[in-house]
Amino acid sequence: MFKLITRSIFIIAIASVFSKNAPASEVATIYTSYIPPVVLDDPKRPGLAYEIIVELFSIADKKYKIIPLPWARAQHMAKNTPKSLIFPFSRTPTREEFYEWRINIFNNQTHFITFNDIKLTAKTARGKKIGVQLKSSWDNWLTEQGYQDIYRIPQAGAEFVKLLRNNRLDAWYTDLMISSSILKEFDPSEITFSEPIQIFRTYLATHKASPYPHIDELAVAMEDLKKSGKLDQIFKKYEVIPNY
């Protein structure tokens, strides 16, 4: 009996050692949302940021699954899922404490956009009704800066144009990549952009308390992607000027 108990304890001890040293899951869980043109619901043309992430995992030779969700839901899942990642995710004070910011995939500038020939500034926009995508980095920034009259919806683009043209909003606050994609069908004379308001650094971020275990390898892959010229090719494919 004593031998049986001793043998059982030994087996449990060995199993414990192996579990502590077992490799992390081979498949990375990555959350995102459809935000044209950076992430698109099109297997042949999946978006600028999507293609960058695929290339990083290819270079690092790591497996992954990309899960598209509504943007607010994607962030909730990333914040509450250990070892997960999220993109395209801009760094803001609101998000700072929850994520590890290692892989800056690109940068982009924001503007206030109007359809009434009024060129806003950060100061004059404070008295206006501003449309913004819910839980976006731009939403974070407006809130952090104390703007009061904010109209938030889950969608990233076209709905704001309708609201502007129907005078239900004074301005739309978004970044240049998204606005350029949405507004390319419109007469440029109808649209007024403010001067650049803020530069956002956009990342493939990971859970801070329990980060993706191969994040260092992905960071090296990002440098390799830049050096190879492939990153510039991806930007060119989507007709975006590289900014990283």
Image: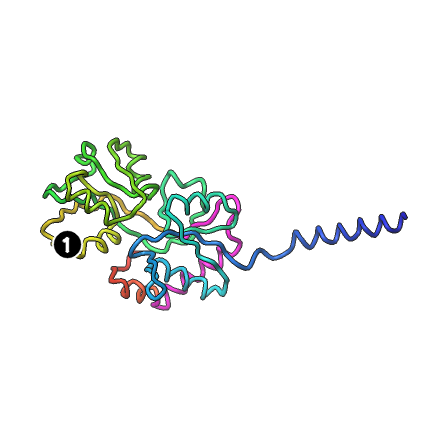
x, y (%) of residue 174?
25, 46
Q: Amino acid at mark 1?
A: Phe
Residue drawn at x 49%, y 43% as measured from the top left: 80
The structure residue drawn at horizontal position 29% and vertical position 57%, both measured from the top left corner, is: 37
Q: Nearer the viewer, residue 167 or 129?
A: 167
Q: Which residues are magenta?
A: 204-230
Horizontal side of residue 85 vs 151, given as left or right? right
> Which residue is at a point 46% across and 49% down the rendered structure image?
206
Q: Nearer the viewer, residue 220 or 44?
A: 44
Q: What percent of the width, then of the height, locates residue 39?
A: 34, 56
* Residue at point 69%, 55% (across, down): 18
Circle 1 is placed at which residue position? 186
Q: Which image quarter is the C terminus in?
A: bottom left
* Drawn side of residue 53 relative to residue 185, left or right: right
Circle 1 packing at 10 Å, graded few (<14), some (14-19), many (20+), is: few
Percent position (x, y) of residue 70? 37, 47
> Coloring scheme of the render?
rainbow
Disc tally is 1
Q: Is 220 or 54 nearer to us in this picture?
A: 54
153 magenta-colored = no
Secondary structure beneath label 1: loop
Find residue 184 and report its horizontal and vertical position in percent.
18, 56
Residue extending farthest to the right is 1
Asked if the magenta segment contains residue 210, the reply would be yes
Q: Which of the 4 image quadrants contains residue 38?
A: bottom left
